[in-house]
Image (cartoon, coloured by chain):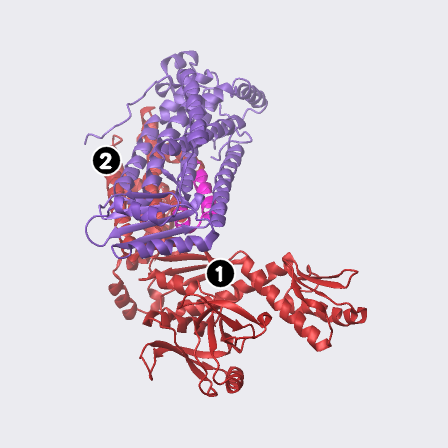
Amino acid sequence: MKLLRLAPENTKFPFMRFRRVSYPFSALLSLIAVALFVFKGMNFGIDFAGGTVIELRAKSGAAEVGTLRTMGESLHLGDIEVQAFGNPADATLRFGLQPGGDVAQQAAVERVRDAVSAYYDLRRVEVVGPRVSNELVQSGTLGVVLSIIAVLSYLWFRFEWQFAIGAVIATMHDLLLTVGFFSITQLEFNTTSIAAILTIVGYSLNETVVVLDRIRENMRKYKKMATAQMVDMSINAVLPRTIMTATTVMLALFALVAFGGQVIRSFSIAMIWGIFVATYSSIFICSPMLIYLGLRNEDADKAASQKRETERKTETAVSADDDDAETPVAAPTAPPEAAEKTPKPARKPAGKRAKTRPA
Amino acid sequence: MLRFSTWKFFAIVAMTLAAVLIVAPSMLSASHYEELKSRLPSWLVPPTIVLGLDLQGGSHVMLEVDQADLIATQIKNLRDDVRRILREEKVAITGGIGTTTRGVQVRVADEADREKILPKLRQLRNGFSSALMGGPSPLDIETSPDGVIRVTITDAGITDKSRKAVEQSIEVIRRRVDALGTREPSIQRQGDDRVLVQVPGLQDPETLKEILGKTAKLEFRLVAEPGQNPSETEELDQVEQEGKIAVEKQVMVKGEDLTDAQPGFDQQRSGEPVVNFRFNIRGAQSFGEVTSKNVGRLFAIVLDNKVISAPRILTPITGGSGQISGRFTVEQANNLAILLRAGALPAKLNIVEERTVGPGLGQDSIDAGKRAAYVGAGLVVIYMLVTYGVFGVFANLALFVHIAFIFAGLVLLGATLTLPGIAGIVLTIGMAVDSNVLIYERIREENHAGRSILASLDAGFTRAFATIVDSNVTMFVAAAILYFLGSGPVRGFAVSLALGILTTIVTAVTMTRMMIAVWYHYARPTKLPI
């Protein structure tokens, strides 16, 4: 059976060379995202802005958006937004906070109900008062900030500091671009969008960790290789997996967009964008950061020379329990020029450093 | 790689079977589930998955104690207490009892009088607050040199009252909602001054709001006569008519003296819907006394400071029962009876958040979620199959068990499945195979590097495992935070996501490994099939 391969085998893309393009490009996009957020703003849903959404379905025939709009205006509810979607019998009304607090909000819903109930069924009514929406903004912001801090402390604990910084920058980048995406598309931003953002943060770190894990592994294996080359080699090695996973998640998300219904559509669309950005940033933003932060040249080399020192003293150094020691993945995955420079890919294990992963 | 302890094998098979058995009843239709329940002992039948309000339809209503109203009520009570003390101690005051923004003030010119009432006023503190000794005082009492005594309710006093109001409200609300005959309403306190009411599957959410939004403070008062002292009367709105009506401030009988209220029809006259009620002994006595003394006058039936009706007292009413009429519809009479039976709320509650989903939309969302899940899972399964062949079959089997585990987890935790929750499951379907992908790609890589099949398989699983753990921990942390900070549907998403991440370690790593080991043992491949 011939199996499908989306990713070409044994690629040798010089990803690191793109950093001179990808950094300015991403910086520009991030600036645009911030500018959009500041000047164009977000289409905040009632969760955060307060207000009312009523979903209607015509008892017979199609919903008449025009009539509903005139009706809405005659009720003096402030800016009223009438939208048709999906089924032609369906429409949503949305209007903002009413002056006069929570009681006035309920009164407004009552007025709309009286006005439309002869021709429409109310399928969904959501009313969020000013105090509740403020609290939702607070808990949403807190959630995003907390999750970033928590995840970073985990990375800090498990990886070298350069990796953690690289991951922060990549994650911030993804966050900014997602916010920019919400602003430019004017997709409604509500509590489900916060869920989308946190999932994107999670996915972005997931991607980053997979790449970083391989870089760390290769860092120990090919001590003499130039950092850029080693990073390129690592990214190329995980590339089939990256493409494969992004595709499966995308397949699931497209199913959600197409069939999941109105309520989670904006969530799914934002997620698709997020997966795309997260994949890009794990390759083009996070990994080059390691080079800029001077990851290995001093750090790893120094560590390596120390190791050699100790190994000379104790001849039994090659610990059998380290699986890296058995047979290193040799030349075939490494670019040929790398193999020339390092005819003997370091056979000695890196040994147990403070932060190595458990065997 | 090939060695696989027997107990591990059986543990996994047992877990899978258990998961399928736990989930199976949830897949039955409601009638079949009931039948199953009636045939088997109840402890054998697991509960079905709890659907969120967004899927089964229902109302989520957050109520908040109206602070302004609460303070006003407390000031009014304080004023009554001060008036009683002044009367009991026979103390004369200059001017009336004045009110401040947070309390009352009286001017007592005579110092001996002041000394007499001050201890009594201080005693009010005990009745005011349930707080233990040593806490901040609920009442501030200060005397200025010109003889003015100010009694002020402190912030601590207000907080305490609103907390108590919430506690009492929960009881009242429970009685009201139970009267609607819905299944499994949930009524919880939220913070110091809120109550969250969640009622699934209501056909008519309007009725719920109708009976939640009313304080239902019922009072019987005499209608003022022309020439009565204006300080003893107040003007109140009428429900059925335009304009106001003057009634006495003094209350003859309060709603708390009702023992029963039932909707009915007026037997004598029009046959219109009415509410029949009965007083307790105290209520019957005072109502009897007042009506005997005031034959021929009008009395007002006041609900939440609005006059429902004002009938004339034709004969003394001493039987302890009566009838409220007010041009009600049948439904209104019904609701009023529910409210009167359940009792009044101790304070006015405002609806600060409402999310109502009609049953039709809920069903549509379930259908949409199912369709998305089937299509999503189908696409992923096909994709894995065409990419990894026989290994794809293993991954797909693991995926099937993974989904069964998620649903079993939902049943065991009693967690709620919401529409975003379904999205979370669809997403974890995409992510679950990520672990398989990591492993398979690693195996390929090791194999290309020149290792034997067995060594590649082994290295693939061992090396990918650390990466899988690292990458899933980050996802799990995000889900956990979402759970603690999110509400309702978003929480459902966090639960599904977290469960999905936990089970993927078992299914994608251990199960797949087992299947591949068995496959290797029997197939003895000479070439890696991926």
Q: Quadrant of the N terminus of chain B?
A: top left
Residue A352 drawn at (x, y percent)? 53, 30
Question: Picture quarter containing residue B526?
Answer: top left
Residue A131 drawn at (x, y percent)? 50, 49
Taking the magenta stretch, the answer to whether it contains residue B475 is yes
Mark 1: which amino acid? Leu
Taking the magenta stretch, the answer to whether it contains residue A350 is no
Residue A207 drawn at (x, y percent)? 40, 31
Residue B14 appears in the rendering:
no
Residue B153 drawn at (x, y percent)? 65, 61
- Specify the segment rendered in magenta: B471-494
Mark 2: which amino acid? Gly
Residue A231 appears in the rendering:
yes
Residue receiving disc 1 = B349
Say the numbered circle drawn on residue B248.
none
Subunit bearing disc 1: B
Kindly indicate whether the residues beneath marks 2 and 1 are on one polypeptide chain: yes
For the point 52% across and 82% down, the residue is B283
Residue receiving disc 2 = B389
The nearer-to-camera label among 2 and 1 is: 1
Which of pointers 2 and 1 lies earlier in the amino acid sequence? 1
Q: Which chain is purple?
A: A
Q: Which chain is red?
A: B
**Which residue is at the front of the view, B130 or A351?**
B130
Q: Judging from the image, what secondary structure is the residue with disc 1 in?
A: strand
Principal SS element in the magenta part? helix
**Which residue is at the front of the view, A261 or A148?**
A261
On the picture, is B107 further left or further right than B439?
right
